[in-house]
Amino acid sequence: MDELEKKIPADMWRKTFDEAAEAPPSRVWDAIERQLDESSNSKVVPLWGAGLASSRPLLWGTGLAAAVALLLVGWWVMPVPTDSEQSRLSDQRQTGVTPAFPKATVPENSLAYESQKKPVPPIEQATKRSVSSAKGGSKQSYDLSVPTRKNQPADGLLSQLTTVPVNKMPVLGELPVLPGGTEPPTRTVSNLMSTLGASSVATASFVREDQSSLSTENSNQLKTLRGKPIRLHEFGHIYRIVWFRPSEATAQPQVSTSKQKSRDLWASANIMPGAFNPMVSVQMASLANAGVLKNMAVANSAYQAQTVTSRANFSMAYQFTAGALLNKRWSIETGVGFLTGRSTVDTPAQLSANGIVATNDIRTTTGNLYVDALRNSSANGPKNTSLDQANFANGAYVQPTYSGKTNQMLTNDYQFVQVPVQVGYQLRPRKRLSLAVLGGFISNIFIRNTVDNEIIVTTKDEIYRPVSFAAIVGARFRYQPSVQWSASLAGVYQPSIGLVTQAHSQVQSQPTTAGMTLGVDYHF
Amino acid sequence: MQDEYALVEGCRRQDRIVQRLLYERYAGKLFVVCKRYVKDADEAEDVLQDAFVKIFRHIDTFRFECPLEAWLKRIVINTALKFLRKQKPWETMSNDSIDVQEMASVLPQADESLPALNYKYLLQLVQELPPGCRMVFNLYAIEGYNHPEIAKMLDIAEGTSKSQYARARDLLQQKIQADSRFTDEHSAEGRKPLV
């Protein structure tokens, strides 16, 4: 036995900690409650909103339709006994036959059950709250007493419903009286009757007895006019709900890993101001093959310095995305967006054969390497372009050459429809200010390229691929002040995967986009 | 037992008042459980919070096959183990994390008898253990699991569990030897051994 065993016996650890308790700070419960609220409130999908769905007539109409549907369903579901059934029930009561329902549901000591077997007790034996008819005649007592026993089972309570003849019921005063002096079928009413004052019951009884003097003919008329009688629940229609728990073998408590509850869905509207650089270049070999450069020596010597470059300008992307939190850390998002990417292309200008610059207006789209390459790459061909007209001098075709010293600056604006698919990894999950890293790819569907507001290149020109892809990398802060709304700020870099131009095109472009995404998110 | 049924049923309905009642009833004991597994009160609060969120979200899975408190405790322990697993407890095996002298501030007074040791003293002893030793000691000596079970729970070798437990005992023994109150007259001969 070592020192530890001598000093602290084994069971002391367990006993001491079994009884130990220490109240945690109140902030723990506050945090728990906040998390529970977030998980419970974020699942509500609003079915109403702006436009037609929120209009008042539509809401009223919907409510009215629902009410009518409920009434129809209720009328159809509620079984109404026929006259023969009512008379059979009456006979059963008169002869003391117990209705066909499980005997266990009616305690033997219940008042209603005994009232079926015993004669009605005299007034003297009634309780203080018993009510008698105001006039003579058939004096009957109505026991409206409320059960006072504690822990009485529901069946017992239900069995003490007061038995009242129809012609003595002030509430059911519209019901007809059966002719011939026969005992009308009794109906049960709940002990809510006890809330009525004795005087009101007596007055109603007086009116009823006046009505009982009506002739048989009048009664028959009333009978033909009567509607569906109010049907109150009887014992036979009460079913026990038995909670049955089968024995199970496993005794280990298990924590369910249902992901449905922890899934968070959101929709976002984003704008992304940033910089778009098409990274254009011109293939020299293609130019030579196309006849633009027939003298390869010129190409090798002069065109090495005559490269087309591009610079990024301000661009803007608009995106609508939807995302889902797969678990505590991972999320997936997709959506649709529109990118207007603006850039500036620096291209060598065209020289005439005698070395004079073809044009003094460096803003023109004619006579520069970039535009010539675009036109030569077009599926429509350069035949109808102004370039060809410019290169014919005195009826002879003049081979264009380009100056490495005189450049033209052209605006070059792209438009893409974007479909991003990205995953996010939450570095700060379930925090009010969360941080996530993003990664994925984006499909860029080419719409058009406008060069200097004059030349418009579309997919029909077969210069650009209809769909190209770019990678997405970035990081996003999201501030969520409420359960449903949050704002996000993300830095995103989108380099193209491969060229956005066709392989045969003289112009090559591999754009990159970098920007800050500002978004508003709604969490369902 | 009826109270447990009512509490569980109320929590299944996500009745916030009943959830609060359940929390008030068991949070005290479970907070001490959390403290046994982590190194300080702040971490214990985090674990307790995560555990109760799990409890309320998965209360449907409780089928009264065991006492409610045992079920709750098991969830808290699992949450604490998951929390500690992120800290790579098996890589911190240094003796330097144990400062026996610091224990003097929380030791009971010298005239207290041994049975009067309150749980705070024992808790301090346990909390000062390295994370790996602390987990194994808690599971073995206090919760009552055996080494194969602990190895499975922590995804370690059974030998690792045994060695960590032995190391925990050594460290605790060092602390106790440094405690002047544990003299021979206070020690109780014939008591059940720790292991």
Image: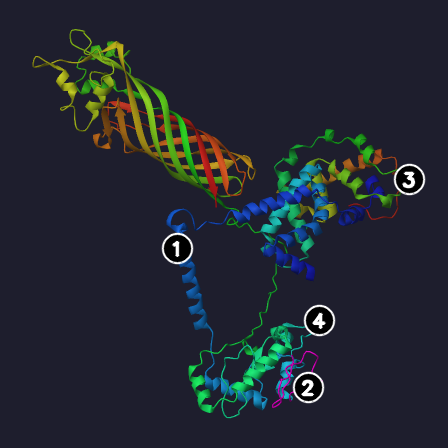
Number of residue marks: 4
Q: Is residue B118 magenta?
A: no
Q: Position of residue B148 (x, y in %)?
A: 66, 47
Q: Which residue is mark 4?
A: A150
Q: CA separation, marks 3 and 2?
A: 80 Å
Q: Is residue A162 visible?
A: no
Residue located 66% across and 47% down the image:
B76
Gap in angstroms between the C-alphas marked 4 and 1? 51 Å
- Relative to residue A117, is residue A498 depicted above or below? above
Q: Amino acid at mark 4?
A: Lys
* Residue in view at x 21 percent, y 19 percent: A372
For disc 3, the marked residue is: B111
Q: Tell me the quadrant of the picture where the C terminus of chain B can be found.
A: top right
* Residue A370 can be seen, yes or no: yes
Cα distance between the residues tagged 3 and 4: 55 Å
Please tell me which of labels 1 and 2 falls first in the chain. Answer: 1
The residue carrying pointer 4 sits among few (fewer than 14), some (14 to 19) or many (20 or more) residues within 10 Å by Cα, namely few
Please check the rendered image and state whether residue A123 is part of the magenta-colored stretch, yes or no: yes
Residue where numbered disc 1 is placed: A57
Q: Earlier in the sequence, mark 4 or mark 2?
A: 2
Q: Earlier in the sequence, mark 4 or mark 1?
A: 1
Amino acid carrying label 3: it is Asp
Badge 4 element: loop
Mark 2 falls within which chain?
A
